[in-house]
Image (cartoon, rainbow, N blue to C red):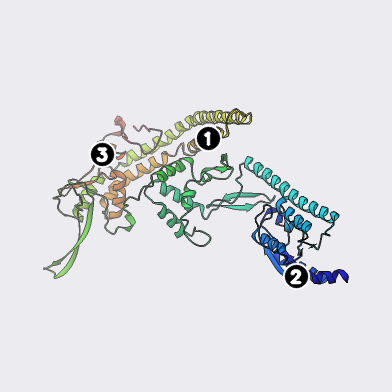
Amino acid sequence: MEQTAINNQQKFFLYARKSTDVEDKQMRSIPDQLLELREFAKREGINIVEEFTEAKTAKVPGRAVFNTMVERLEKDEASGILAWHPDRLARNSVDGGKIIYLVDLGKIKYLKFPQFWFEATPQGKFMLSMAFVQSKYFVDSLSENTKRGLRQKVKRGEMPGLAPIGYKNILTADRRKIIVVDKKKSPFIKEVFEKFSTGKFTLKEMYGFLAKNGITTSGGKPLKDKISWILSNTFYYGHFKFKGEIHEGVHSPIITKKLWDLVQVALHQRSKPWSKANIERIPKPYLGLFRCGECGMMITGETKTKLIKSTNQYATYMYYRCTKKSKSKSCSQAFIRQEELDRQLSNEIATVSLRQDWVDKMLLRLSLEEKDVAQSCHAFVGEKQSEIKAINEKLQRLLDSYLEQDIERDIYLTKKSELLSQKKKLEEQVLKFQQTQNAWLEPMKQWIMEAAAAANIARNNNLEEKKVLALKIFGSNLKLTDKIVYSEALNQWSALRADPPTRDWERGTRIGLASPPWEGSILPVY
């Protein structure tokens, strides 16, 4: 009864704290603390004049609410503190020492905790000091254990922290946090890299593209400030940076190192988008296909409507003409009707058609070539794997030199980054070669089939189909001068135009492919 009377006469501040630190995950929430402390105060007859709550770590000094409470205790606005446990007041030596010092000065006469006993005696202050020391030791030990865990995670090739956009964090069955590819978002991230690597798009267009596909900030805004970080993040091709050091990751890359390098060049240049001719958006079938042979400007299309007197009806015609946008030269080229343009283009396409007997024998030759290519694969892969092994040995020697303090950390980090980059490129070369050793065969086969179908396409009335094939055959080399179409096919199609397939296969006439549609191999076709 006497103690209760004293408590009722004294003024107490109630202090409840909770942070998001790892060590606080099992601690009671602020509402739970308040509920328990209010019941304890009622049971013990403690006079609470004000409640202070704070959501902040106590590992370091600088808590605004705690400092305000201490200042008011120094002004004698209260003489005691009620808290859940001493570690709610302090987990660092500065704040803990401040509490004990105020007890020594008599500014704090009472400290009440539901699970800890305290009196302002030498023994009580000793126990309080031990409680603060124990709290700090717990934090320090936990911090060291956390750092050790992070180092082990990095050694396993797992990046600590939140997954970048295009990936997601998951918890495995054995309670390990890992990063895996987000199958919904990763295709859009990959497309952003592919688009930006061409140099035809701006950063604004890229985060606009992501926003259009639902990839935004948590507030629904475009990733304006993060798009550069995304495009320069090594995580997307398989490496990650931790404390300034590059490490090899075990996660699945979204892009290749080669694509990432191209994006870095584009980021450096920050080029503006080129004007793009999008075939699907153009209603005029041959728009964007021809250039003027006189001034070099693009050929545009426009419609003309005329009254036919004999029938007293209007008819619409499509004409094509030079845009005449050159600032350095004038252009005298006249209009050409779409029907005439189509007739001439059809004749040009027909010059690259293949006879069926040639098609059959070329396809047979391809099947034989596939067997020959397989023999060179083993030697190539063995050579690259030897280079990778040599780089691994260099990395180990580099690490040994760093641990022996023979080289500075900056030199170690720079050299390690270079070696890992070389290793990644070699690994991608091996993987690409293994996956695509016969990849040119399919484009070659497709080319043969397209050449076989060229005659039919030239005869039909599907103008869009003709345009698609014409772009493959002539690219940007189709020109129009004095209403005459002419071209310079500088790729594999030029062989068919120079050596039309009208000669006898059996006599050994060779089709010379000036620019094969594959890389690293030339297919001899007889």
Q: Amino acid at mark 1?
A: Thr
Q: Amino acid at mark 3?
A: Arg
Q: Nearer the viewer, residue 291 or 136?
A: 136
Q: Is the Cβ of the residue at disc 1 closer than 8 Å to that at disc 3?
A: no
Q: Nearer the viewer, residue 205 or 502?
A: 205
Point out the tag, 1 or 2, that comes first from the N-terminus: 2
Residue reaching furthest left? 309
Question: Disc 1 vs disc 3: which is toward the camera?
Answer: 1
Q: Residues within 10 Å of mark 1 (few under 14, many from 20)?
A: few
Q: SS for tag 2?
A: strand
- Labels 2, 3: front one: 2
User: Which residue is the site of mark 1?
Assistant: 414
User: Residue tagged by mark 3?
Assistant: 497
User: Is residue 26 at least partly visible in the picture?
Assistant: no
Of labels 1 and 3, earlier in sequence is 1
Q: How far from the left and from the top, in percent, is residue 361? A: 36, 37
Q: CA distance from mark 2 to mark 3?
A: 98 Å
Q: Is residue 422 left or right of residue 104?
A: left
Between disc 1 and disc 2, the foreground one is 2
Percent across and percent down for residue 502 are: 25, 37
- Helix, strand or loop at mark 1: helix
Residue 54 screen position, x and y as percent: 67, 62
**Left or right: 280 in relation to 3:** left
- Residue, disc 2: 48
Q: What's the mark number on residue 447?
A: none
Identity of the residue drawn at 28% across and 36% down: 495
Expressed as whole percent of the image width and height from the top left, the position of residue 134 reads 78, 50
Q: Quadrant of the C terminus?
A: top left
Asked whether the viewer can see residue 522, the reply is: yes
Residue at 22% across, 56% down: 301
